[in-house]
């Protein structure tokens, strides 16, 4: 059974751990660079991206996370997608620059504009929870759009990495986490 680490500094990491279990993986909470050694892949959860960046810096995780991503799959949801993006606007902020996408923070509105919606996933639909979600403005060459919402990409895969702008851990549908575990297994 492959181990999916879940960055457990801030955000809804517990829900991701439960989603990894439902999808057939073994989750572990990651708080230090040493914790990464036990992981076959890593999930960067939603939360507040500026707070997460500060905590990553405090814990000296910036370079270990980049090095991990150079070797193993990483999956970011919502704020995690912001942290993994190449470029961030709305307002601009630093990122780990792991996946070749550009995002705009809070592009679907404020907390009050959060919603549950149906997204298109190649002929089928999936329930998606959007909470102060970023919008993917650009997908680099080699990126694959796996789901859209109102014509915008909301689930993107690029090589071994993937991101969602929604929170798949908050539904009972395990398809997103299963796809990530497939990446972890290869």
Image (cartoon, grey):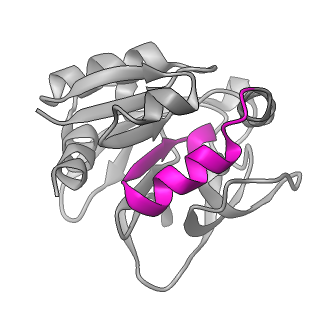
Residue 57 placed where, x, y %?
A: 78, 35
Can residue 147 be seen in the rendering of this structure? no
Label total for image: 0
Residue 68 sits above or below residue 25 on the image:
below
Image quarter (top left, top right, bottom left or bottom right) of the C terminus:
bottom left
Can residue 152 be seen in the rendering of this structure? yes
Q: Work out whether residue 59 or residue 160 is closer to the camera in this orientation and state it.
A: 59
The residue depicted at 17 percent of the width and 22 percent of the height is: 22
Magenta segment: does it hold 97?
Answer: no
Residue 179 vs residue 145: left or right? left
Image quarter (top left, top right, bottom left or bottom right) of the N terminus:
top left
The residue depicted at 20 percent of the width and 42 percent of the height is: 175
Residue 126 occupies which quadrant of the picture?
top left
Residue 25 vs residue 116: left or right? left
Q: Residue furthest right?
A: 91
Residue 140 placed where, x, y %?
A: 54, 80
Residue 7 placed where, x, y %?
A: 52, 28
Residue 94 sits above or below residue 170 on the image:
below
The residue depicted at 49 percent of the width and 44 percent of the height is: 76
The residue depicted at 34 percent of the width and 36 percent of the height is: 39
Which region of the structure is painted magenta? 59-80
Residue 116 vs residue 175: left or right? right
Residue 179 placed where, x, y %?
A: 22, 49
Magenta segment: does it hold 60?
Answer: yes
Q: Work out whether residue 116 or residue 28 is closer to the camera in this orientation and state it.
A: 28
Residue 55 occupies which quadrant of the picture?
top right
Residue 80 vs residue 159: left or right? right
Q: Work out whether residue 98 or residue 46 is closer to the camera in this orientation and state it.
A: 98
């Amino acid at each position: 059974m492959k181990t999916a680490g879940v960055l457990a500094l801030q955000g809804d990491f517990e829900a991701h751990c439960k989603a990894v279990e439902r999808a057939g993986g073994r989750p572990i909470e990651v708080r230090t660079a040493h914790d990464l050694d036990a992981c076959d892949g890593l999930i960067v959860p939603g939360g507040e991206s500026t707070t997460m960046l500060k905590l990553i810096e405090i814990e000296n995780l910036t370079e270990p996370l980049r090095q991990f991503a150079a070797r193993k799959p990483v999956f970011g949801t919502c704020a995690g997608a912001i942290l993994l993006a190449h470029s961030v606007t709305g307002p601009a902020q630093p990122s780990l620059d792991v996946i070749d996408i550009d995002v705009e923070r809070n592009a679907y509105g404020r907390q009050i504009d959060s919603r549950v919606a149906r997204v298109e996933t190649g002929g089928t639909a999936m329930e998606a929870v959007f909470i102060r979600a970023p919008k993917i403005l650009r997908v680099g060459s080699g990126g694959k759009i796996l789901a859209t919402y109102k014509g915008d990409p909301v689930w993107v895969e690029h090589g071994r990495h993937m991101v969602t702008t929604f929170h798949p851990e908050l539904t009972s549908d395990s398809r997103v986490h299963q796809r990530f575990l497939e990446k972890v297994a290869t």
